[in-house]
Image (cartoon, helix red, strand yellow):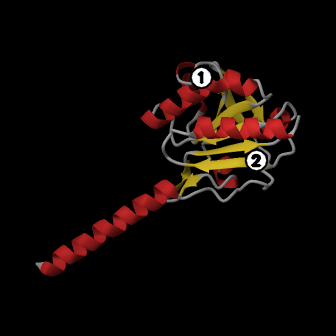
């Protein structure tokens, strides 16, 4: 009986440890790293189009944020917060794009209801972009972790933040954009 309890206790501790790791592991792309260019099917305001990171970087910095799944609680909260902040990002010539492994039909609905027609969301059903940015969940790499990058017009990362909590992604990326803009007047 004691052996079963010890084994069970060890299993619970290991499971908790892996859960903590999956919640806190961070992306390997860091400030100063060049980002992989990509195009992806995206939706803005319910209309689909081909999003090109290279084209957006010609306009200014880009906030690229990955999220696990449309219409889940945390992802909905995060989408609302980004939507509310889009006008502030625009003051710094910065655009926002969200990416998940969801299909484009789901994201077309999400772009209207949760992104409030303010910024595009891109479909990465095959997880190629998620993989290129090392933004997968550690225990389920095809699904995006909650990772936010701020990318300078030269294609290099200015800032990276990883946390499954939707809190702080908008605040932190906006502060990074403001700091970058102040240094690049």
Residue for point 53% across, 24% down: 114
- Disc 2 designates what residue? 158
Quadrant into which the N terminus falls: bottom left
Give the image location of residue 68, x and y in percent.
52, 43
Q: Nearer the viewer, residue 7 or 92?
A: 92
Q: Is residue 48 in sight in this rendering?
A: no
Q: Quadrant of residue 103?
A: top right
Give the image location of residue 35, x and y in percent.
78, 50
Rendered view: 1 above or below 146: below
Q: Secondary structure at mark 1?
A: helix
Rendered view: 104 above or below 163: above
Residue for point 84% across, 34% down: 55
How far is the residue under mark 1 from the one under mark 2? 22 Å
Residue for point 35% across, 62% down: 16
Residue for point 41% across, 59% down: 19
Classed neighbour count for the residue bearing mark 1: other residues with Cα under 10 Å, few (<14), some (14–19), many (≥20): some
As drawn, the label of residue 84 is 1
């Amino acid at each position: 009986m004691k052996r079963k309890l010890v084994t069970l206790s060890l299993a619970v501790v290991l499971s908790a440890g892996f859960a903590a790791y999956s919640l806190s592991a961070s992306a390997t792309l860091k400030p100063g790293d060049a980002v992989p260019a990509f195009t992806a099917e995206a939706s803005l305001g319910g209309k689909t189009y081909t999003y090109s990171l290279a084209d957006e970087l010609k306009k200014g910095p880009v906030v690229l944020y990955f999220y696990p799944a449309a219409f889940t609680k945390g992802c909905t909260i995060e989408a609302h917060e980004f939507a509310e902040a889009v006008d502030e990002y625009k003051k710094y010539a910065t655009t926002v794009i969200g990416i998940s492994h969801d299909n484009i039909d789901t994201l077309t609905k999400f772009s209207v209801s949760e992104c409030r027609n303010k910024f595009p969301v891109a479909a990465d059903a095959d997880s190629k972009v998620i993989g290129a940015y090392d933004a997968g969940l550690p225990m389920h790499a095809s699904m995006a972790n909650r990772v936010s990058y701020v990318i300078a017009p030269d294609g290099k990362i200015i800032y990276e933040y990883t946390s499954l909590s939707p809190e702080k992604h908008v605040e932190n990326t906006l502060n990074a954009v403001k700091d970058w803009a102040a240094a690049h007047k």
